Image: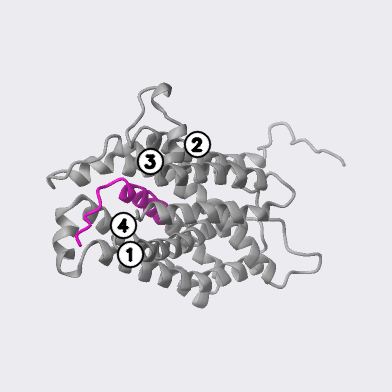
Amino acid sequence: MTLTRPTPGAPDPRGPVRRAGAGRAVAVLVLVALAALIPLLGPSAALRGTGEAGAPGAGGIALLRTVLFAALCIPVGELFVNRLARSLPGPEGGHPAAPRSWSLYAAAAGFAAALGLASVVATGNLVPDEVADVDVGGLYASRDGKLALLEVNAFLAAGLCAASRRPATQVWPLAAVVVAEALRAHPTTEHSPLTGSGLTLVHLTCAALWVGGLLHALRTLRLWPRAAGAALLGLYARVAVVLLAAITATGVCSSLRRMPPETVLEQLTGTAYGRALLAKVLLVAVVAALAVWARRRLRRAADPLTACAPARAEAVALGLTVAASGLLTALPVPIRW
């Protein structure tokens, strides 16, 4: 293969590409930093004036939950979109190459976040001041401790699967994380905890498919021809409609279980949980509007890939929604039976 060098004095054609890539990286870092402020600063803002007491280190716990949710969404979305891509009729020679997988990095981040959350559980739901405060053996003595250990081991197994020759096998440890989160969110002292766990299981699964799937679909479009990319985005959009319906239904049912209908309006403004839930609902409404906009462009625009602009905005809004979900898990739940 012959390598050609640019003529002296001529501009390097790779320059604009590198500048564009650097600009995207800076934009992503800024968005990640802004999203991190939601769980870090959100607890104090949500609790202000409610008379409720927040858990120690609520901001840090909310941030760890956000990282854990994001680490779950990325590999689930990759598996989902890769499955959709294989269902499309490919050109002669097969489909174009998929983007580089982020699953291994996501598993490492999820492992670190799960380990941090397990250390909090091991100290009696208090933030440990030093390593000696962490009672690892005590994790086996409680339900929350066992679930925390399950999540740590599941992310470790997911990382090993992602690095293996059969990365699709990581679906099983990722499913274990979803089940553990569904059980953790509904303790046995709650009224009909299995019903709540079932709702959370469906809600979290559909959310991970939606968020992670959109991110991976947008990454895939950058490598695929326009016609194939438009077909993939259209197929994802059709499935996303079903996912949105399931997320909405399970979210409403879960909220009504924790906030009875006659108290919803009061709790949406008078409790920290209600305020965070209201913020999340508004974000989901924005996401839904952007999704409808992108779907209309896919159907009616001369170039269907103009739908990528609202789809990218949708991905950003979904990232903020994940951060709001992490905040929600760190606030006191107003259960009133």
- Who's the residue at 33% across and 49% down the image? 329
Any mark on residue 41, and which? Answer: none
**Residue 29 falls within the magenta-colored stretch:** no
Q: Quadrant of the C terminus?
A: bottom left
Question: Tag 4's secondary structure?
Answer: helix
What residue is shown with label 2? 112
Counting residues from the N terminus, which is met first, the one under dot 1 or under dot 2?
2
Q: Position of residue 117 (x, y in %)?
A: 42, 39
Q: CA distance from mark 4 to mark 1?
A: 25 Å
Q: Nearer the viewer, mark 4 or mark 3?
A: 3
Q: Is residue 16 visible?
A: yes
Amino acid of disc 4: Lys
Counting residues from the N terminus, which is met first, the one under dot 1 or under dot 3?
3
Residue furthest bottom as drawn: 300
Q: Position of residue 154 (x, y in %)?
A: 56, 46
What residue is shown with label 4? 280
What residue is shown with label 3? 63
- Tell whether label 3 touches label 2 (CB within 8 Å): no
Which residues lie in the magenta part?
A: 317-337
What residue is shown with label 1? 192
Q: CA distance from mark 4 to mark 2?
A: 25 Å
**SS majority, magenta:** helix
